[in-house]
Amino acid sequence: MKKKISLMLLALVSIIALGGVLQTASVLADEFDIDRIEEQYQQGYLLISPNRLRYKGLLEPGKSYTETFMAYNIGAEPISFNLTVEPFGVKGEDYEPIYSEATNRTKVTDWVSFPTGTEFTLAPRNERDERNNYIDRIEITVRIKVPSDAIGGGQYAAVMANIVSTNPGPSVGAKARIALLLYSTINGDVVYKGAIINQAISAFSFEPIIKTSSTVENSGNADFQATYRISVEPFFGGELAYENTEEKIIMPETKRIFEQNWDSAPALGIFNVTQEITYINEDGQEVTDTFKRLTIICPLWLILVVIAILVLLIIAIIIKRKRRKMKGSKKPSWEQG
């Protein structure tokens, strides 16, 4: 009986492994996504790029710094918008954005100006002027003038592109706007300090998905960037089945939870899953922590089928043994009476 059960379990493992191997090539062919390369935000017919402004290095008090972004009209009619500045923060570990709460970390809101203006009208998509220059787009300059008494640490704001056109685009309300997030760090008493306080990789899944979840804490006074890399390899060897890298900004004095999943995994498979997280540790050093786990993907129906087969096998063995006992207990006719 033990031998038969072992054979059944070996067959199940082989089926799962084969499912993972057969699906690897087709998954790799679907990974290219242009939206991951071209950083952009879109609202109706207005598109801006990049999707955030992060001033490089430490900004010195008493000096001015500039960054630029592009605004595009991707519609068939002119579009008008204006620029305003609002404080930016986050709420909760899911990082719900907050644009109305002023804090010591949003004083940059008062330091921002726009040398190229605050009101714009863009021509329809691909339209040019008499000099053959495109007039459906514009480069906008954002200047930060840091006060001489500015306190060191992170400063955050949101540049709002408020659409005022009568026809802003499909499914766009009258007060549609795009938030271009602004990140900066002022030189002074700057503290970089963080930690990974939670990390998990799913060990088993009934659905074709492999999940990872991690929480990174920033206990310093300036933001830092965390990089998450997941790689999935078939347990029985073969080519890399999946990999993905994501970058997230961790705001000061916050905790951020991030889920990095393989949503298009095969229905069957046994995989070695590795996640690497690069972040700033408690000593202010950039480090990389590595987490590994064996993950099994198997649909519930298959498990139920295997259980049913095992139950039937056990019942058949029990019935067979009972029949043998009954035959052995019967005496020959010449021994009776």
Image (cartoon, rainbow, N blue to C red):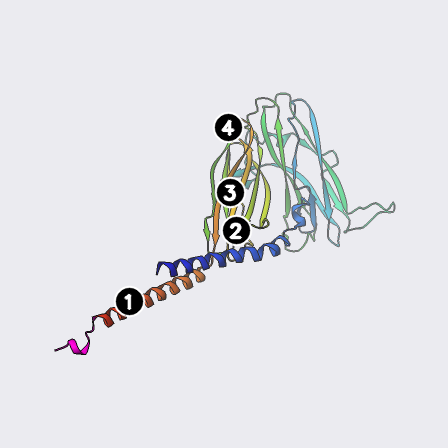
Q: Are marks 4 and 3 in contact (CB under 8 Å)?
A: no
- Check disc 1 and report the residue beneath it: 321
Q: Earlier in the sequence, mark 4 or mark 2?
A: 2
- What's the distance in space between the residues labelled 3 and 1, CA to CA? 60 Å
Q: Secondary structure at mark 3?
A: loop
The residue that mark 4 highlights is 282
Counting residues from the start of the chain, the first of labels 2 and 3 encountered is 3
In the rendered structure, the answer to whether residue 290 lies left or right of residue 184 reads left
Q: Nearer the viewer, mark 4 or mark 3?
A: 4
Give the image location of residue 25, x and y in percent. 61, 55
Tell which tag, 2 or 3, sits nearer the viewer: 2
Residue shown at the point (53%, 43%) measured from the top left: 274
Q: Secondary structure at mark 4?
A: loop
Residue 331 lies in the magenta-colored region: yes
In the image, what residue type sits under mark 1? Answer: Arg
| Of callouts 4 and 3, the N-terminal one | 3
Marks 4 and 2, Cα distance to the nearest angstrom?
38 Å
Magenta range: 329-337
Residue situated furthest left in the rendering: 337
Q: How many marks?
A: 4
Q: Amino acid at mark 3?
A: Asp
Residue holding disc 2: 236
Q: CA distance from mark 4 to mark 1?
A: 66 Å
Depth check, mark 1 against mark 2: the one in front is 1
